Image (cartoon, rainbow, N blue to C red):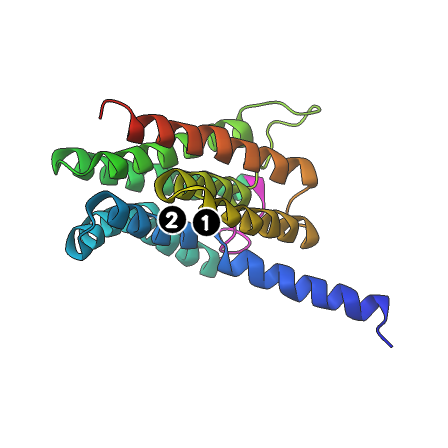
Amino acid sequence: MTTSTDTRTVHRRIARLATEVLAPWVWVLVLPLAIGWHATGDPGAALLWGLIVGITGSIIPMAIIIRGARRGRWDSRHVINREGRVVPFIACTTSLGVGIAVLVLGDAPRQMIALALAMFATLLVSIAITFALPVRGARGWKISMHAAVAAGSAVILTVAYGPWLALVGLAVVLVAWSRVELGDHTTPQVTAGTVVGLIVGGLPYWWLATSFV
């Protein structure tokens, strides 16, 4: 007979797996390759442009975050505590900013530039919510980057590949649930992250990628 403790353990294992597999760095590494393929239809070009965004938006920031976590500068590679997110956010915005410059100077496809700009906008808004907005007397609010990146990615994939990709929304629900289940975020925090991803990440991509064609 399954006990409530056993069920709780299973839930936490599933949540931990979802948190790792659907982490922001995974989305930011895989999504540019998918959009690169859609934009060019050429494996070489898709790999080139996709890796520029993936490396500057995911690999470089993640390397900095993992190194800091190993040195004890923040709690883990997911940087759960709000105060520890200063350096990771700076690393993400700086590295991705360089990536955007390379895309523009290299005359990258419009969709790739739109993707990078949408990601950058999501970062800026997340930083503002995390550190600037007062919430119930607190100095700031720890928005869920897992939810924000997943939600934005779902919209972008749907815009690029069609309505069937809206099924990726199930992954957004799963990762949002996992963050609450693990106690790393509250329901309002993952909800806010999802809204930011949809509006600040998804809509700008749609507008930039489809306008002026």
- Tell me if label 2 and label 1 are in contact, CB under 8 Å: yes
Query: In this picture, is 158 found above or below 46?
Result: above
Callout 2, which amino acid?
Answer: Val
Question: Which residue does the image show at 32% across and 32% down from the upper left?
Answer: 117
**Residue 28, numbered label:** 2
Quadrant occupied by the N terminus:
bottom right
Q: Magenta stretch containing residue 75, yes or no?
A: yes
- Indicate the quadrant where residue 13 lies: bottom right
Q: Residues within 10 Å of mark 2 (few under 14, many from 20)?
A: many
Quadrant occupied by the C terminus:
top left
**Residue 101, numbered label:** none
Q: Residues within 10 Å of mark 1 (few under 14, many from 20)?
A: many
- Taking the image as shown, residue 134 lies to the left or right of residue 28, namely right
What residue range appears in magenta? 72-82
Give the residue number, with chain letter if any, for mark 1: 24
Q: How many marks?
A: 2
Marks 2 and 1 sit apart, C-alpha to C-alpha, by 6 Å
Q: Of helix, strand and loop, which mostly describes the magenta segment?
A: loop
Question: Which residue does the image show at 24% across and 40% down from the upper left?
Answer: 99
Q: Nearer the viewer, residue 209 or 129?
A: 209
Q: Magenta stretch containing residue 61, yes or no?
A: no
Query: In this picture, is 90 found above or below 164?
Result: above
Secondary structure found at label 2: helix
Question: Which residue does the image show at 55% across and 39% down from the upper left?
Answer: 83
- Indicate the quadrant where residue 195 lies: top right
Callout 1, which amino acid?
Answer: Pro
